[in-house]
Structure formats: C-alpha cells, structure tokens
Image (tube, grey):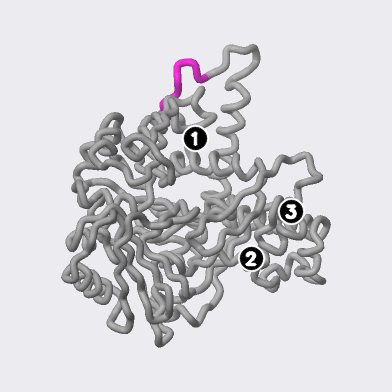
Amino acid sequence: MRLDFSDVPLRDTAFSGKPMTFIDQEPKNFLGAIMDLVAIETGDRRAREHWQRKQIDNLLSYAARKSAFWRKRIGGNKAANFEQLPVLTRADVRLQVEAEGSLLADERIKSMRHATSRSSGTPIQFFISQMHTEYLGVRSAAQFFIEERDLTLNSTRLRPEPKSSKDGFTVQIRDDALGSLASLVRGGKYKYIEYFHPNMDALCKELERDSIGYLIAHPHLVEAMLQFIDPEFFKRAGTAMFNPVAGAVDPQLRKAFVSSGIPVRGTYSSEEVGSIGFECEKNPGIYHLATSNVMVEVIADNSVRGIAPDLGRVLVTHLHSYATLFIRYDVGDVATFGDSCPCGHDGPILSNVYGRAKALLKHPDGRVSVFFPRGKELAAIATFDEFRIRQTEMSKIVLEIGGGKTLSEDEKAAFVRLIKEHAGGDFIVEVKAVSAIDWGGNSKRLGFYSEVF
C-alpha cells in the first residue's frame, strides 16, 4: 500500500503556519472524512460489512426509541432479522413524516425539510440532517481521489430551473470545485448554470468561455443541445468527462461522447438518500455501491422479468437517515445485484439499473421493455424547444412537442411511427403541440415517464 500526495495539486500555502500544526482544522477534517469514506468503500470487505451491520443496529435501536411508527414496524425483530422487516413505501414515508415530523427535532443536531421531485409521482416531504448534507459534499470529492481524477479541472453543472432570465439562463461561478479543500488544493472553478428555454447560441458561448471540465447535466438537456451542435463541440469546449445526473443515458448518446474522446461516468442517487452508486471506470452500466452511505438489496419482482438476468426491485437503507428513517426503502427502480465487479472492486454492485419512471415501458400484455426514444430522432422530424413522452395508460403514449409550433399531419404521423418503432405496435400514440410543457415542480424534466408503474 502506498499513500502518496505527489500528484495532488497542493497550494503553496496548503500547510498551516501555526505552531505544532500541519494542516488547518477545516480542510484537515474534510480530508480526513474523504479518507474515511475511501477506506470503507475500497477496503477490506469484512471490515466494511461489520461497520454496516453496526450502523443498522444503531438505526434500529434509534428507531425503536424515537418513533412509534417504527416500533410498530420493528415489533419483536432484532437487527439479525433486518431482512425480514417490511418494505418501506413512499406512502409509508408520508405517514411517518405527517405523524412525527423530524425525529431529530429534540436533538442538538440540525435538520431541514426536503422533498423529492415530481419525476417519480407525487412529491414526498421528509427531513434530512446537517450531517447528510455534509456527507454529500465529502462523497462527491471522494470520487476524485478514488478515480484519480484531475483536481485542477473545472466543473460545470447545468440544471433546469423555471424562471425568467436573460437568454434563458443564469450563471454563478465559485473559485473552486472542491469545497472545504479549497485552502489545501488548487481546484478548478465550479460553474453553476440554471436554464429555462435557453438561447442555445448564447448558452454555447457561455460554455466556451471557461473550459467545461466535468460536465454535470441531465441527459435530456444534452440531447436537446445536440439538435443544434455536434458532440465535438463539447470536446472543443474542454469537456474532460460527462457526468449524467437524474436520468438514464441513451446508449447512442453515450456512444457519441465516447467517440469524441469524452468518457461518461454516471452517478446513481435519489433525493431521499443521496448517493447510491458510482459508475465503474472500466465497465459502463455497472455501479459500485456507496457503501459508506447505503446498504442495498434487490428483491424479486415478477413484473420486470425477462429484461435482464435477476432483475428486481431496489431497496435502500440509508445508514445516516436519523431525521426521517429510510430502512428497506423501495426507491421505485429495478436493477440486478452483484457481489463484486469484473474490474476487481471487492464490493457490491448494481447493473441493469432502470428507473421505473425513467426508461421502462409496460405493455398491455404485462411485458416490460426498455424505452429510449432519442431527442435527435425526434428533431429530425420537426424543430422544437423541448419534448416529453408519457405512458398515461397501459395502452397509450402521449408525446408533447413544446415550442408553439403547429405540426403538420405528416409530422404528426412521422412522430407516431417513430414512437411505435421504439415501443411496439400495441400502443395508441397521441401527439400534442404545446406552447410550453407544464413540468410543474419537476426539476428532472424526464424525456420519458411512465405513469402506470
């Protein structure tokens, strides 16, 4: 084992000038937390599993002490029978929060209200602790060290936000992308862009203004941009890696980036629990679980058999969820579980990860299939600002084309043919031209959403 900082771009003033001090306390604590997480997730399996079991014991003891809702669920079960506890649903979480609020309300630990997006149905309210927020920052930084990413590159985050602004987007820039490590490490800039019907020419100029570095964006936005630009634009603008968030990546979109020399590395997460898994560097589509944050199970689900081997429902236990407990929580996704990765990572993995509301289509005969209509294919038929596809009934798919353009009958017919090519002929397809799509409070703006799961 070698612990070496020779490749870490330390600042000239990284080390403290105070007597009997090496590194000032804030960056030292942050760096120490990173090392803790890396040790848990990449270290000895037995040590990791022992730690996780202790965290589950802590959660269950806390639940029994603090929550009447959870005392009823746990009953006489002990931690050894953790897998026999009932599955926690979204409806259960609503009941828990409505009845008890934050379980940290009478503790000296700060908690705050949070909510899911509308992408997975009616939003649910819940509470998160200050520790959870801090963990997310540390875990994000830890991935730079795990993958030996270049710490000096910029990070560019694109996020949809329905508000009026010049050219349809706003820009905020921080001097660093590494949070509390800023005084220790020479990091890149962090550019945060919120957009709503952006002027693409102006947005592209903004992206070219500073090297993009790590592009953090919803795949749906990137597909919309590819109506106007080619993938080589991102390479020219200095994109070192595409980190898709909040949605599945179409295989063709991944191929376009990789062909341009830009690796794609996804993160699997949820609003309720934060980080769940990080895509393997060597095996696309396989996610190393964030075992410092969650314990994951996959249980059988007959409704999704046949898409991939051993596919089942994903249950997540958030090991730090003391404000609102998430124990054996059904996040609404399906995946295949594995004990280790072909790359040599000796830790649990998920593959064939499908969000039920993101990429799976349910057929009238009960079959389920992957559904990946591409923005580029839609744009070849007609120009538009945005699109949304919804499975509204077991036999019906609705395509909304936003931008205020009137569609000809030929264009409508072409859209119907395209959707049926992807979905199969057993659906009624309705095409609607709208001035703007009503996304409500849904920050994810999924290109496809099934309302029947």
Magenta stretch, residue numbers: 6-14
Q: Residue at x 72, y 70 (%)?
A: 81
Where residue 119 appears, x then y in whole percent?
48, 60
Q: Nearer the viewer, mark 2 or mark 3?
A: 3
Determine whether label 2 and label 1 are within 8 Å by CB.
Answer: no
Q: Main secondary structure of the magenta part?
A: loop
The tag on residue 101 is: 3
Where residue 442 appears, x then y in whole percent?
47, 55
- Whole-Å distance between the Cαs marked 1 and 3? 44 Å
Q: Nearer the viewer, residue 447 or 279?
A: 447
Determine whether label 2 and label 3 are within 8 Å by CB.
Answer: no
Residue 149 seen from this side: no
Q: Residue at x 32, y 73 (%)?
A: 430
The tag on residue 328 is: 2
Q: Mark 1: which secondary structure?
A: loop
Label located before the other in sequence (1 or 3)? 1
Q: On the rendered structure, is 57 left or right of 162?
A: right
Q: Amino acid at mark 2?
A: Arg
Q: On the rendered structure, is 43 left or right of 432?
A: right
3 drawn magenta: no
The tag on residue 3 is: 1
Q: Residue at x 43, y 42 (%)?
A: 163
Classed neighbour count for the residue bearing mark 2: other residues with Cα under 10 Å, few (<14), some (14–19), many (≥20): many
Q: Residue at x 62, y 18 (%)?
A: 21
Q: Is residue 252 depicted above or below 180 in this figure?
A: below
Residue 98 seen from this side: yes
Q: Amino acid at mark 3?
A: Gly
Q: Is residue 16 depicted above or below 3 in this figure?
A: above
- Whole-Å distance between the Cαs marked 2 and 1? 36 Å
